[in-house]
Amino acid sequence: MSHTLHDHRRSPWLALWVRPRHTLRSLLKSRNAFSTRLLLAGVLGIVLMTELAAVQGLGLRHGALYLLVWCLPGGLLCGIAGLYLFNGVTCLVSRAMKGRGDWADTLSILTWTNVPLCVVALATLVQLNIAGMDYFMAGGAIVEHPATLALTFAKWIMVLLAARVGVVGISLVQRCSARRAASILLVSLLIMALITGAVFWGLEILFSLM
């Protein structure tokens, strides 16, 4: 048993894919480093801001420098702030649904949930290499290039794996069933979507007035 836990601590990036419950349980006993948290939160933010830029077709209205600032520094800041905000929302939802986990454990779980999204980031880099600026033209480049379309499906698979890791982790820290953990995660994501939508809507109005 101790040998198994040692293996999970040594290579959680790999073990998380095949044995998420055992890996997350061992990671909860050894708090993740702050640098790891920043890395994974930053990856999440960059992925989300890049996909948001593509969906909104920002490439039709802005140049490469704007997109670079939007996706990299903007994504990094949004990812880090979003992780802590999402953790707070998840803790509140968990308490409302009779969960028993604490802030630190929930934060650790949500941090490691981002591991599959590292693959999403790599797939996005490949798509950008194939499509170039066309990637930010409201999805047109994804349809025109079969390789980018296939990578999009692969990215959705990684998102589902991240959701699976999140459900397993929340069920561990909140000491609840997988069904209740999935409900906690879903409600938290919906609340975050509303908050994020309101923030971006407000920023869009602000920029239009400037």
Image: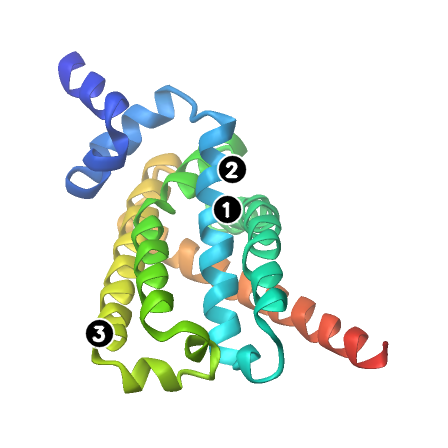
- Which amino acid type is shown beneath numbered disc 1? Gly
Residue at the image position 21 percent from the left and 16 percent from the top: 6
Report the amino acid beneath label 2.
Leu
Q: CA distance from mark 1 to mark 2?
A: 6 Å
In the foreground, 138 or 63: 63
Separation of residues labelled 3 and 2 (CA atoms): 31 Å
Between 140 and 161, the one nearer to me in the picture: 140
Side (left or right) of 188 relative to 27: right
Q: Position of residue 108 (x, y in %)?
A: 44, 34
In percent of the image, x 79 and y 81: which residue is there?
208
The residue beneath circle 3 is 147
The image shows residue 74, relative to residue 22, as above or below, that is below
Residue 210 locus on image (x, y percent): 86, 76
For residue 42, the mark is 1
Q: Which residue is mark 2?
A: 38
Q: Mark 3, mark 2: which one is toward the viewer?
A: 3
Q: Position of residue 151 (x, y in %)?
A: 25, 68
